[in-house]
Image: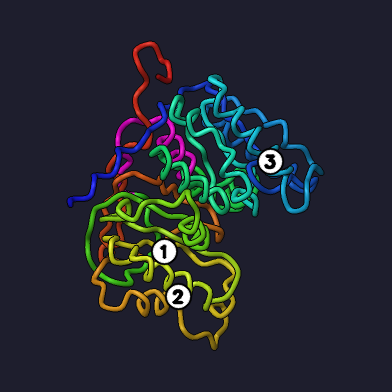
Amino acid sequence: MTPAAPPQPLRPRALRPGDLVVVASLSGPLHATDEPGLEKAVVVLEGMGFRVRRSPLLEAGRHRWWSAARPAEIAEGLNALLRDPEVRAIIAHDGGQTAFGYLDLIDFEAVTADPKPILGFSDISLLHLVFYARTGLVGFHTDVATPGLGGHWQRAPAARQAELEKLYSALLTGTAPIGALPATPTWECWRAGRTEGRLIGGVINRIVLAQATPYALPLERFDGAVLFWEEAGGLAAHVWTYLQVLRHAGILDRISGMVVGIPDGIHGLDSPHASPTLREIVLDVLGDRDIPVLGNVEFGHAGPNLPMPVGIRVALDAQQRTLSLLEPAVRPLTKTGAGG
């Protein structure tokens, strides 16, 4: 029996100047020391032409254990934003360790009724995977607000920050494909080849753990996909293990290409005596699977993030070190400008 074709991506409508973007606590808390970064992030978003508001849970010092609030409270706040027609995009303040606690409380019908961009990475990459699995929503795997737009971006050269602002703005407002993402000398060809497929990915531990839940992506959704992933902290052996899980699950036999982010703080990769390298780990697990692999691409915890929109078709040429977005992440406005 031929497997059913994967559903078409659910694209939010393009944002317009003056649209409301809400910075939300979707996982970790806002510490008092984060306030300057959050304020800078708001300036960045306003510089793109958007109105910006904080979600009610985004209060310095408010927390419950390692989270901004109890999972049910975070879900309630997220659902309110998903249902509010004035809110046109949501960007996570930060990542954390909470999203797994409220997957069963998310209003997926609200997502389908009024899809809107949800921006972030780290723990937020779990939300992208789950929304894509349940509704087809395109996930905006981008920097979070406070440590990203208000942190890593501020320390980047002015030209790079301007480049990223233009790229993010085009991602949210433009209805033409962005094309080639801006490559840098860090990009490495780990296995040559060229392919096209839908981007699927995030933090590798979230990919693996999500597949163990009822919110997992059906395996056929990985057919021909370009898997992108990164990891922060832990051990090099953990990365090897996660990749082995993907192998056992059959995912590595289905994908057509792989893009690996710059690793951040992984013990065993940052020592002069470290062995193996991340490239060696990846190629060891892939074995004789002849798929292109592009390494050390700027997304994830190590610094300013290039956007990696989940569900969008891309062209990957590892030898030429190019990654191109072949489709827009948003859809055109209707004649009335409504989101329907």
Disc number lying in front (2 or 3): 2
> Which residue position holds label 2?
278
Rounded to the nearest angstrom, the CA distance separating label 2 from label 1 is 9 Å
Q: Is residue 103 left or right of residue 129?
A: right
Can you say which quadrant of the picture contains the C terminus?
A: top left
> What is the span of residues highlighted in magenta in the rendered image?
163-180
Disc 1, SS: strand
The answer to which of 56 and 106 lies nearer the viewer is 106
> Which residue position holds label 3?
38
List the single residue furthest toward the left: 1
User: Height in image: 42 above or below 335?
Assistant: below
Q: Earlier in the sequence, mark 2 or mark 3?
A: 3
Q: Earlier in the sequence, mark 1 or mark 3?
A: 3
Question: Answer yes or no: do the residues labelled 2 and 1 have beta carbons within 8 Å?
Answer: yes
**Residue 173 in sight in this render:** yes
Can you give x and y, in whole percent of width and height, for residue 290 in the image? 23, 71
Disc 3 residue type? Leu
Disc 1 residue type? Val
